[in-house]
Image (cartoon, grey):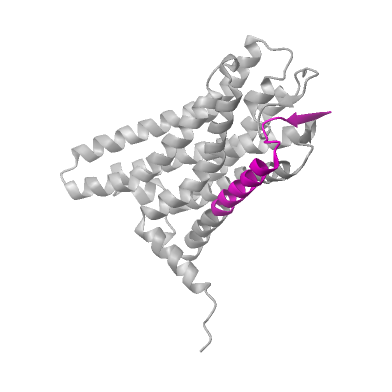
Amino acid sequence: MEFVFLAYPSQSEPRILSFLGVSLVYTWVITGNVFIMVAIQTEARLHTPMYYFLGSLSGVEIGYTAAVVPHILANILRSEKTITLLGCATQMGFFIGLGSADCFLLASMAYDRHAAVCHPLQYPLIMPGTLCARLVAASVVLGLCLSFQLVAFIFSLPFCPARGIQHFYCDVPPVMCLVCAQSHRHEQSVLVAATLAIAVPFLLIATSYACIVAAVFGAHSAAGGRRAFSTCSSHLAVVLLQYGCCAFVYLRPSSSYHPEQDQFVSLVYTLGTPLLNPLVYTLRNSEMKGAIARVLTRNRPPQES
């Protein structure tokens, strides 16, 4: 049993342009996030909880883009854009699982910033290395567990004979549109999983930032307040983009699904957010810019005299 993707362009010129555009963005996503991971690993001054979470976030984003983007590139060039039932379930499981882990990691990063700004003296005790490692591991395990349970539920439902997916890859809303046994209970089950993966972490992030804002306004040092806002603003920009797109796609009833609109929004959080993360976290961070510059300098081949 196979599904057919219907969202790809059929004419040769749009296909070539799509392939070149997606390839360029994907190359930048991989390159930028790998540079962040290498810089954090090799620079001793970046061995802090904030950068540990940032490196973990880069690794997760490489994983969840790798779950779908190579398949998108292959489908652009192929005449038959099909995927097996098992392949579709596997792709959805890892994409949703690592995407959920991304959301949980952003919540962990917000908690880290809350501890650093609101409790600076106790910060080393609040965020030891073991807790950071446990939070990263829990984010990935919890995300994958939620995802695989959701995928097992979706693919246990009966599918209609028409198996055309109005999308570029196997995502929850377009696949749910192919289920024949549509009911309020099925929709609620999907909504509960989306709420646990999106709404709950977002509430934790909102609470952390509310405490940060209160602490900054209560501080006597204006320079310290500006420094705290500068540190947190880049993280907040990524959070708003990621959660805004995910909430638009997953936290709404399937009756409001619009293929063309959802295809564009899904590309934003599939390629746009992983593309912006290296830019946001490096351009606004002098330590990261310096670390990446040193990594590039060390790996530059020596010039012949």
Image quadrant for the N terminus?
top right
287, above or below 127, in the image: below
Q: Is residue 254 visible?
A: yes
Is residue 29 rendered to the left or right of residue 15?
left
Q: Nearer the viewer, residue 254 or 189?
A: 254
Which region is colored magenta? Answer: 1-29
Find residue 75 and report its horizontal and vertical position in percent.
Answer: 72, 41
Find residue 161 and report its horizontal and vertical position in percent.
Answer: 81, 18
Q: Which residue sits at x=19%, y=42%?
A: 219
Q: Is residue 131 visible?
A: no
In which quadrant of the rendered view does residue 291 lie?
A: bottom left
Q: Nearer the viewer, residue 104 or 16?
A: 16
Find residue 33 and report its horizontal and vertical position in percent.
Answer: 53, 53
267, above or below 222, in the image: above
Please, which residue is most extreme toward the bottom here? 305
Please, which residue is most extreme toward the left here? 220
Please, which residue is most extreme toward the right here? 1
Q: Which residue sits at x=53%, y=19%?
A: 252
The verdict on residue 6 being magenta is yes
Q: Which residue sits at x=28%, y=44%?
A: 229
Is residue 159 rendered to the left or right of residue 270?
right
The verdict on residue 266 being magenta is no
